[in-house]
């Protein structure tokens, strides 16, 4: 079976975990601080605040930005549900925007229209989906014009760039996930990045029971702290992140060159973006996706349909009265199919995947 995702764990990660376990300091501590500094430094942010997951990182970032009950946050209709759940966790309400069907990211014309229609919006939450940056020139220009804050969801975009600058450094804050399928992992975990001292201070309070001085709780906080065990894995993974991404781009380049089936559209890449291919997501046209899925299953090729529904049409969102018709999303969700692109693939496996697609 050629897997759709596979974390690349070496003896270095195992040794790092054993070192932490032998130290007896397995909860949040110095290793977490080292990882926060290392990851923030890699991306180019002043502050890193490690959390238990990408979802809690998003929630903490929003709360640190002052987003709360009654606020509106404009965001994409097409992503993993955690992107938007974080807005609800903060007590705010998402305002959905359709996507660009080529990049799968939030549509800039739709974003402009949503900002005009919602002059009281407090923030934008943009998602760099599947590893490709949003048009951050346009996002930041619109945010400045309308006076809203920007949170970048970089859960799938570790190392991705827009015009040579790392995502996660454009907005007021950014959130990353380190789930095992991501471009690098800590097992579970996430991190908030920001260049703003005030947001960093508040985020640190939020993840640690509202506590700066031990047993003095300044605000209502949570236990969203990363463990030293997770951070130890992350430090080793970070050392190889550039190599992981290079392997993903190499595999993607092979697919770009060898997938010639007229029913299949390979991912579009903006010339200003450096894609890191968290997913290599094709679009299978003319109602042929199910046929390709059957071929993959017969030939032992892993795949993923990310995502079969828009967020607003999920049952828990329908009940809240959100609009469920999004033309671009509704087209894309019936065609998308993600194929193996992770760095643990062999050249023979990549070639085999392309060959199966050629049989459609």
Image: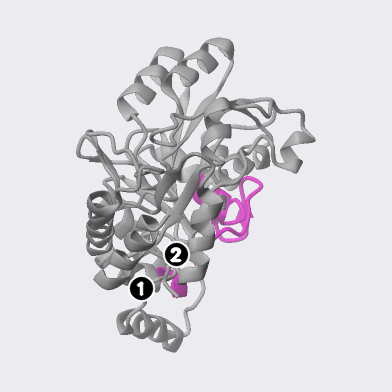
Asked whether residue 22 appears in the rendered view, the answer is: yes
Give the magenta-colored segment's residue range.
203-231
- Residue farthest to the front? 359
Q: Secondary structure at mark 2?
A: loop
Cα distance, mark 2 to mark 1?
A: 13 Å
Mark number displayed over residue 177: none
Colouring method of the image? one colour
In this view, the residue in front, 146 or 339, is 339
Where, quadrant-wise, is the N terminus in this rendering?
A: bottom left
Residue 158 colored magenta?
A: no
Q: Residue at x 49, y 62 (%)?
A: 295
Asked whether residue 66 appears in the rendered view, the answer is: no
Q: Where is residue 205 shown, x and y percent of the image?
A: 54, 49
In this view, the residue in front, 1 or 143, is 1
In this view, the residue in front, 120 or 287, is 287
Q: What residue is disc 1 on?
A: 8
Q: Where is residue 215 shown, x and y percent of the image?
A: 62, 60
Q: Where is residue 327 shown, x and y percent of the image?
A: 57, 26
Q: What residue is disc 2 on?
A: 4
Where, quadrant-wise, is the C terminus in this rendering?
A: bottom left
In this view, the residue in front, 288 or 83, is 288
Residue 212 colored magenta?
A: yes
């Amino acid at each position: 079976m050629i897997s759709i995702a596979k974390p690349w764990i070496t003896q270095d990660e195992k040794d790092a975990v054993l070192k932490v376990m032998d130290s007896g300091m397995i909860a949040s501590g110095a290793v977490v601080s080292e990882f926060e500094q290392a990851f923030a430094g890699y991306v180019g942010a002043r502050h890193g605040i490690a959390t238990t997951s990408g979802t809690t990182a998003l929630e903490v970032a929003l709360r640190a930005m002052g987003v709360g009950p009654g606020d509106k946050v404009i965001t994409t209709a097409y992503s993993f549900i955690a992107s938007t759940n974080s807005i609800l966790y903060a007590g705010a309400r998402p305002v959905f925007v359709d996507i660009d069907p080529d990049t799968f990211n939030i549509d800039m014309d739709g974003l402009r229209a949503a900002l005009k229609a919602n002059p009281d919006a407090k923030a934008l939450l943009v998602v760099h989906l599947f590893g490709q940056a949003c048009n951050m020139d346009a996002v930041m220009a619109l945010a400045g014009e309308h006076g809203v804050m920007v949170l970048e969801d970089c859960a799938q975009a570790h190392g991705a760039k827009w015009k040579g600058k790392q995502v996660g450094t454009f907005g007021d804050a950014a959130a990353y996930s380190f789930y095992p399928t991501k471009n690098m992992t800590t097992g579970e975990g996430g991190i908030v990045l920001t260049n703003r001292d005030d947001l960093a201070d508040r985020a640190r309070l939020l993840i640690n029971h509202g506590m700066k001085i031990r047993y003095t709780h300044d605000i209502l906080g949570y236990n969203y702290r990363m463990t030293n065990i997770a951070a130890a894995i992350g430090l080793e993974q970070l050392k190889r992140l550039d190599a992981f991404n290079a392997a993903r781009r190499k595999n993607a380049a092979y697919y770009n060159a060898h997938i010639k089936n007229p029913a299949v559209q390979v991912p579009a890449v903006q010339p200003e973006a450096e894609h890191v291919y968290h997913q290599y997501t094709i679009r299978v046209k003319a109602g042929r996706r199910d046929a390709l899925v059957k071929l993959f299953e017969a030939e032992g090729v892993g795949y993923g349909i990310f995502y079969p529904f828009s967020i607003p049409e999920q049952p828990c969102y329908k009940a809240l009265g959100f609009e469920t018709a999004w033309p671009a999303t509704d087209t894309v969700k019936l065609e998308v199919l993600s194929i193996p692109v992770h760095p643990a693939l062999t050249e023979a496996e990549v070639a085999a995947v392309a060959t199966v697609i050629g049989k459609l």
